[in-house]
Image (cartoon, rainbow, N blue to C red):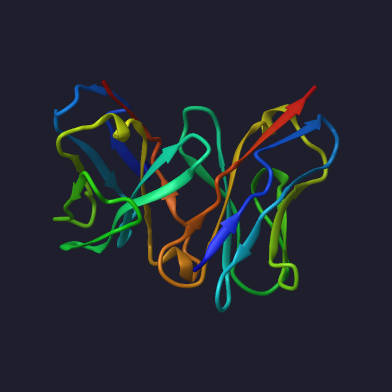
Amino acid sequence: AQSVAQPEDQVNVAEGNPLTVKCTYSVSGNPYLFWYVQYPNRGLQFLLKYITGDNLVKGSYGFEAEFNKSQTSFHLKKPSALVSDSALYFCAGGSQGNLIFGKGTKLSVKP
Amino acid sequence: NAGVTQTPKFRILKIGQSMTLQCTQDMNHNYMYWYRQDPGMGLKLIYYSVGAGITDKGEVPNGYNVSRSTTEDFPLRLELAAPSQTSVYFCASSYSYASSGNTIYFGEGSWLTVV
């Protein structure tokens, strides 16, 4: 069965420091991987996706993610965190059928 | 561009009542979805549709029904509401299968409480 895991419930980062939100996947065949962000009381907003090609994917708001096939990971990164990046982040993936969502990671960026 | 619009935003239901969550999209997407989000549980797929007249069950369909009479609309009906249906509901759409790389676009959510 396909699965997507976000091993951290919460990540705390100081403003200006780099941030990483982790995601691992178990998908048969070639995976399609997504990151979404959810601000309080709002819907999910698309950040970026990996389909094929360059393993480093750049997305909205300065975020990027690195696809690592050998480690089956798709970690979300940003070089310098902002307080406004504080939100709930979801990784999602699949290769067939419907997309599988991780449980979400709450990112807290402190001034 | 409105995207995916769902109503109502908030609703309180009594146990046993029924209601319909409305969803419409203006992106001419073929695929539409209903998810529920519970704290710490991520998103669970309730029902989805790959086109007008075609619907299928997702991971957690019990207690819900859907219909897709047009490309734009995908209402979700709750029959005999139960406290376990207290959740946040998201309607979403995509041009084709997200597992083929198509981006899913979400509505703003509907907060439902069953008391």
Percent across and percent down for residue B80 are 15, 34
Q: Residue at x 43, y 39 (%)?
A: B37
Q: Which residue is drawn at 18% across and 55% down?
A: B68
Which quadrant would the N terminus of chain B be assigned to in this image? top left
Percent across and percent down for residue B14 are 19, 22
- Image position of B72 (left or right of B102): left
Q: Which residue is drawn at 71% across and 51% down?
A: A22
**Towards the viewer: A23 or B107:** A23
Percent across and percent down for residue A26 are 59, 67
Q: Residue at x 30, y 35 (%)?
A: B85
**Towards the viewer: B25 or B6:** B6
Q: In which quarter of the image is residue B4?
A: top left
Above or below, comparing residue A71 to residue B77 in the picture = below
Q: Quadrant of residue A27?
A: bottom right
- Image position of B26 (left or right of A58): left
Query: Which residue ends up furthest to the right in the rendered image?
Result: A17
Percent across and percent down for residue A67 are 71, 65
- Image position of B45 (left or right of A61): left
Q: Quadrant of residue A110?
A: top right
